[in-house]
Image (cartoon, rainbow, N blue to C red):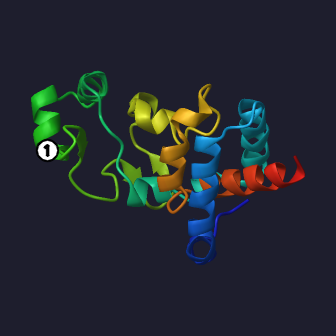
Amino acid sequence: MIVNLRSFRKKVLTCKKSMRSFLTRLENRPPKNLHQLAEQADKEVWKVIDCLSCGNCCKKMTPTFTQKDIKRISAHLEMTPHAFKEKWLTFDKDGDWINKKLPCQFFNMADHKCAIYEVRPADCAGFPHLAKKKVTNYLHVHRQNIQYCPATFKWVEKMQAMAKKA
């Protein structure tokens, strides 16, 4: 399904607070079957969300680049790690390497594809981190991502619906 970012932003405005509260409750009192619920919601999300129709993560967020990412990507681009960091990255307040600007320099606005997809940062490869083995370790990430990622938003909607049934 094609993602309509305008309607997505409207839904975020009305639901963000309640979704964040829900995720906080899950974090503080996780049900025993949380991982199974997360996996089920994850499978359902990808039936209705197509990342290539969105690209909002690449437009509005930056991954954290590990030293391993920097080495791999710079080699792919035939640059030194130092030259890659100088050209594209900045060191943030948390001590992480992130993009200097948004949208991501490797994001193609026309087709929503990544120019370095094969060697993209691990943070991008795992995004949006919906079905991680230790779900509670990522709930704080989901609290942040619901405003950027329609898949995360839909996942939280699914989790809320399943929690009501339980």
| Left or right: 103, with 6 as reference point | left
Percent x, y for residue 62? 34, 49
- Under mark 1, the amino acid is Lys
Look at 81% across and 55% down and name the residue there. 161
Q: Quadrant of the N terminus?
A: bottom right
Residue positioned most to the front? 29
Q: Residues within 10 Å of mark 1 (few under 14, many from 20)?
A: few
Residue at coordinates 65% horizontally, 41% vertically from top-left? Answer: 29
Q: Which residue is mark 1?
A: 87
* Observer able to see residue 165: yes
Q: Nearer the viewer, residue 64 or 37?
A: 37
- Residue 47 point in image, percent of width and height: 78, 48
The furthest residue to the right: 165
**Camera-side residue of 23 and 109:** 23
Q: Is residue 150 visible?
A: no
Q: Residue at x 55, y 43 (%)?
A: 139
Q: Is residue 141 left or right of residue 130?
A: left
Residue 125 at x, y percent in the picture: 49, 34
Image vertical order of residue 123 relative to residue 104, above or below: above
Q: Secondary structure at mark 1?
A: helix
Note whether 71 is above or below 51 in the view shown: above
Residue 129 image-quadrant placement? top right
Q: At x 34% / y 59%, what residue is drawn?
A: 103
